[in-house]
Amino acid sequence: MLSRVCSAALSGIDAYAVEVEVNCGYGDTLIALVGLPDAAVKESKDRVSTALTNSGYKFPMGKTTINLAPADVKKEGPSFDLPIAMGMLAASEQLQTDQLDQFTVLGELALTGGVRPVKGVLPVALKAKADGKSGILVPAENAAEAAVVQGLNVIPVQNLREAAQFLEGEIRIAPLKVDIAKIFAHPTGDEIDFSEVKGQENVKRALEIAAAGGHNVILIGPPGTGKSMLAKRLATILPPLTLDEALETTKIHSVVGLLAAGQALVTQRPFRAPHHTASDAGLLGGNINPMPGEISLAHHGVLFLDELPEFKRSVLETLRQPLEEGHVTISRAAGTMTFPSQFMLVAAMNPTPDGKMPHESKSSPREIQNYLGRISGPLLDRIDLHIEVPAVKFRELAAAQPGESSAIIRERVIAARRIQHARFAGKKNVACNARMGSRELKSFCELTESPRELLKHATTEYNLSARAYDRILKVARTIADLAAAKDITSDHISEAIQYRSLDRQLWG
């Protein structure tokens, strides 16, 4: 007898439908699994056969052929265990149901028949809804993740027998519902706060500007000045994720397997801090079958690169396309994948090889230039704000009065973002000032005579590139938004120019 079960597999961060066809025939008892399965999928026939027996079902006699269609796309992972088991039960007439075509089924099986969680459930749930399925059978630990898809019945199952009994109508399992508003209303529970940072008011101001406009930042200062401490707190002043942003971010984390058991959504902006020994595949994504890397895991959040010059030059250069375009395309023999990567880059570095300020360093001018030269000009051009982080004075360290809290700063950032959302309403892929293209710059960053002359003088004096010129305009627009000013003034341009210290070769 032939049976068909609907399932799905992942391609990048999206899912595509897979039809599991099972035919039980005559002949010697064996299982033939076809449809380009990888090693993990091939092993499923052993897991499924044992799980069937331990769940009280009979193993089908004769030749059982299992086909995973489409047959020209490689299938990966253990998520086909449960649909294969359902198909074998239906093909051997141990499962009597007419609901198999109404549900998408996925899950890994334990030898006991228990259903274990799998990766990528949210993309599969979105695909099931798009295909018009009435519901989806998933491991209980993944059910909350799938339940964020509205209009889809999410059936959490604990074991193989429970899944079969539900499809036969012997038991009723209530679809899991989640309150998305309640998930977003949950307190952030930030363990870190800007109020803990002593001094560094100028740096805090620059990071507020960066958060308000989504700008990339580099922090330059000696060890112990608080660069890492400040960078880690940047995520606490970013505006909250929207539902669309949360879904897109959750999809990426789900595919990689970073969601905690029972977690429905990623509601906090990601903060990723890869080590400086990371490879280009680790940063961009890769492997034989491309998976998201650190820059995609930081999508809609912060990517922090500490000790920037210590990263390999080739690794840093791979950041140029994602920083400019907001996505990364990876080509491998298995195919080409495009992953989203709209992140804020926050980098930190010492001013000299020995970590001291230039006037205190024992390094020669050539050694300092060689050290700074590890970061290419085109990459620096894509960093909007170059912020000097000086040593904190004793009176600031000893001050009992706490600094301004992240919550207060975040309110100003949110107010500035509201102005930008209204400005860019209807414009695709432009959510903040940092994402403005040449057309938006011309429309929203028009200068009067005085600020234009100031910017012209700075461009000539510091020999700024065209990209640096655009960055100054974008930062000035953000400074004006924080002040709720309609027009960009000379003061806004002047402050924006101050954040281009590496363009001025300050350390030369």
Image: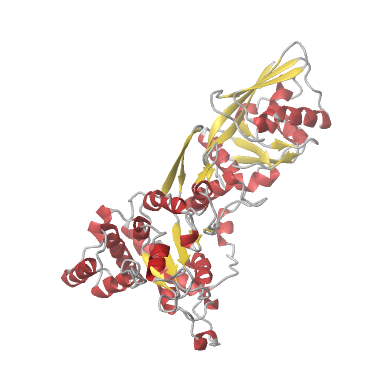
Colour scheme: secondary structure
The answer to which image quadrant residue 107 occupies is top right
Instruction: Tell me residue 336's x, y (percent).
Output: 46, 36
The residue lying at 62 percent from left, 27 percent from top is 37
Q: Which quadrant would the C terminus be assigned to in this image? A: bottom left
The mark total stands at 0
Residue at 43% of width from left, 52% of height from top? 319
Q: Position of residue 99 (x, y in %)?
A: 65, 28
Residue that protrudes farthest toward the top in the picture: 27
From the top left corner, tell me how far across and down residue 416 is, in percent: 38, 67
Q: Describe residue 102's horizontal placement relative to residue 390 as left or right.
A: right
Please state which of residues 286 and 407 is positioned toward the viewer in this rendering.
Answer: 286
Instruction: Work out whether 38 lies above or below 60.
Output: below
Residue 346 against residue 67 in the figure, above or below? below
Please state, as top left, top right, bottom left or bottom right, where the N terminus lies in the image. Answer: top right
Is residue 415 visible in the rendered structure shown here? no
Q: Residue 452: x and y, percent? A: 19, 68
Q: Residue at x 63, y 52 (%)?
A: 263
Q: Nearer the viewer, residue 387 or 65?
A: 387
Answer whether residue 373 is visible to the viewer in this image. yes
**Front one among 176 and 358:** 358
Residue 79, quarter of picture: top right
User: Toward the viewer: 15 or 292?
Assistant: 292
Q: Is residue 355 above or below residue 172?
A: below
Horizontal relation, residue 144 to residue 278: left or right? right
